[in-house]
Amino acid sequence: MESKVYPVSDEWAQDALIDAETYARKYRQSIEDPDTFWREEAQRIDWIKPFTKVKDTSFDKDDFHIRWFEDGTLNLAANCLDRHLADHGDRPAIIWEPDDPSHDNRILTYRQLYEETCRFANGLKANGVKKGDRVTIYMPMVPEAAIAMLACARIGAVHSVIFAGFSPEALGNRIEDCDSDIVITADEGHRGGRKVPLKANVDEALDHHAHVSRVIMLRHTGADVPMKEGRDITWDEAVADQSTDCEPEEMAAEDPLFILYTSGSTGKPKGVLHTTGGYAVWTSMTHEYSFDHRPGDVYWCAADIGWITGHSYIVYGPFANGATNVMFEGTPNYPDFSRFWQIVDKYRVNILYTAPTALRALMREGNEWVEKTSRDSLRVLGSVGEPINPEAWEWYYHIVGNGKCPIADTWWQTETGGHMITPLPGAHALKPGSATKPMFGVKPEIVDTDGNRLEGPCEGALVIADSWPGQMRGVYGDEERFFLTYFSTFKGRYFTSDGCRRDEDGYYWITGRMDDVINVSGHRMGTAEIESALVLHEKVAEAAVVAMPHDVKGQGIYCYVTTIAGVEGDEDLRKELIKWVRHEIGPIASPDVVQFAPSLPKTRSGKIMRRILRKIAENDTSNLGDTSTLADPEVVDNLIANRPDL
Ligand code: WT7
């Protein structure tokens, strides 16, 4: 396959933090002599007690363990705050931009962020939170969301941030799964001119999950919300009279830092567990190198803190590096399609990190929205969450970046903690749609279905052959699931679940998930989760969910539903089921298509043939592949004949 190549410009080749030669040298060292490489690289973190051991890991079943910097101790919040105070306490740490541009923005310096974090950390302690306790955070994109996370890290509590787009039901399940008895929330959030009823959602979640003893609520929109006597207090009450200093807890490198729920191929989301030391080194290093981040840069990651991108690249990586972080509560299309670019100009953003889905949504509105802004402050552009199609890449590069900003197409996962395969702006020639080359310490391999390592240009399953510091350490509350999910498919290797192609230049091209995970607007949804939600409805007998191509979202959610006997699948039921899924999981899981089917294509042993359902959803029915194992071939003809016109 031919592809356009954008070489590193002369300017970048001269001034980059990491140029091509440095990359080659450092990469080789990171693989051949990880001990020396990481011993040096880990000095970017202030350790309370320095580590002596660097890496002690094995992906083998009999001796499975992952430990980095094991005997070192540190506090990550102190690394994000305290150590910046002496030299640049007055530097803006957060520039917060509200949803509505006519509202006031807020700027918090590193000193203010330090003080607010300490006050809240003391407030948490006063409310009984101790080291190791799980704290659920369900917040809009406001500085207090980051403050709550950092406050947990400061006292050694384990945060579990739940994206504000999840429903009460999903929130309640996640609170219960990690046995958290405190929830931090706000009255409401703002999003694209609408209000998100966060406190009401918490109340509804807690109606069924009653063991939560404390809810701390930030007044944000000022909505009049009921407060439950004895359980609910406001943020202001929690921090009243608290000191602006709070001794950071000394954490072992492998002590848990946070849990973040993500979807897999089963119905139940996994609590991905990350620990402290390795994650600190990994997020700080990747944030600096992938974006060529320099002190004083204005950096904007437009993700939400509810996802791993927000954890690693709004909170921990950037703050560890003393970055000036733009934090945006709103959406790219409110009040109009120029919003992103206006923010870039308003704060003279140097580094912008966003998702292909946002770019595609803006791209189709026309270039005027972009071109009426200058964007001349931009130096590096980042992309995350899903494969970026070459058309969106070219638009990002030429129209948004004026043809002068390298694009870091960062491939990684909730599980990997940070960037794994990504171009470094001064080191790699770019090919639109390719995540290019591995980060230091990452050893990608492409294997066939039998686990044989493929050499040279090839295509297959993407695995990582050895451990890296930012890797997840476990599935919360389910020790076996970690090994089984990631290390049992291909012996001795971490399986990413992504398909991948390597070209003649050794560039990696992610081709998408190989499991039953759908990537909707860069958000990861398990088909099994949506199916479980659908069959909970009293009129649904059976459901199968697959991905369909979607122009803006990348992938959409296509549901095949069989109703119970005597119930007609009509327009009303279709609407009801969409509402039902939104209620069970949240608006991010809204089905794009619901097709009623008298029955689903199954093998003679009763297994649903998803491959066929995918083909029909893609409207690619000319070649359905092998259908000889179908129990009843007529089922397929019926599905094709009744496919809705989209
Ligand atoms: C899945 C992980 C990465 C943080 C946000 C999403 C897909 C992610 C890329 C990219 C192609 C990508 C993969 C991966 N993905 N980034 N640059 N190019 N695909 O994290 O929710 O854990 O999803 O997102 O399929 O496995 P996540």
Image (cartoon, rainbow, N blue to C red):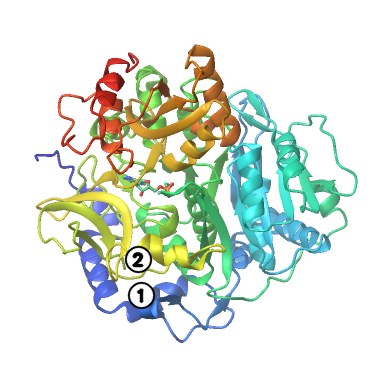
Residue 639's place in the image compared with 489, above or below, is above
Residue 386 location in percent, x, y?
Answer: 35, 41
Residue 29 seen: yes
Considering only vertical position in the picture, is 627 above or below 120?
above
User: Looking at the picture, how far across and down is residue 264, in whole percent?
Assistant: 43, 49
Secondary structure at badge 1 equals helix
Q: In this view, does 131 lie to the left or right of 385?
A: right
Q: Tell whether 10 sits left or right of 202.
A: left
Picture quadrant where residue 105 is located: top right
Label located before the other in sequence (2 or 1): 1
**Residue carrying label 2:** 487
Residue located 41% across and 35% down the image: 520
Indicate the position of residue 145 as horizontal and vertical percent values.
65, 47
Decide: few, some or many residues near mark 1? Use Cα within 10 Å; few <14, some 14-19, many ≥20.
few
Q: Residues within 10 Å of mark 2 (few under 14, many from 20)?
A: many
Name the amino acid, label 2. Answer: Phe
Q: Is residue 527 left or right of residue 325?
A: left
Which amino acid type corresponds to the residue marked 1 in the rendered image? Answer: Lys
Question: For the point 49% across and 19% down, which residue is it?
Answer: 574
Which picture quadrant has residue 622? Answer: top left
Q: In which quadrant is the C terminus drawn?
A: top left
Picture coordinates of residue 208, whole percent (x, y)? 73, 44
Q: Is mark 2 on a helix, strand or loop?
A: helix
Q: Are marks 2 and 1 in contact (CB under 8 Å)?
A: yes
Q: Mark 1 points at which residue?
A: 61
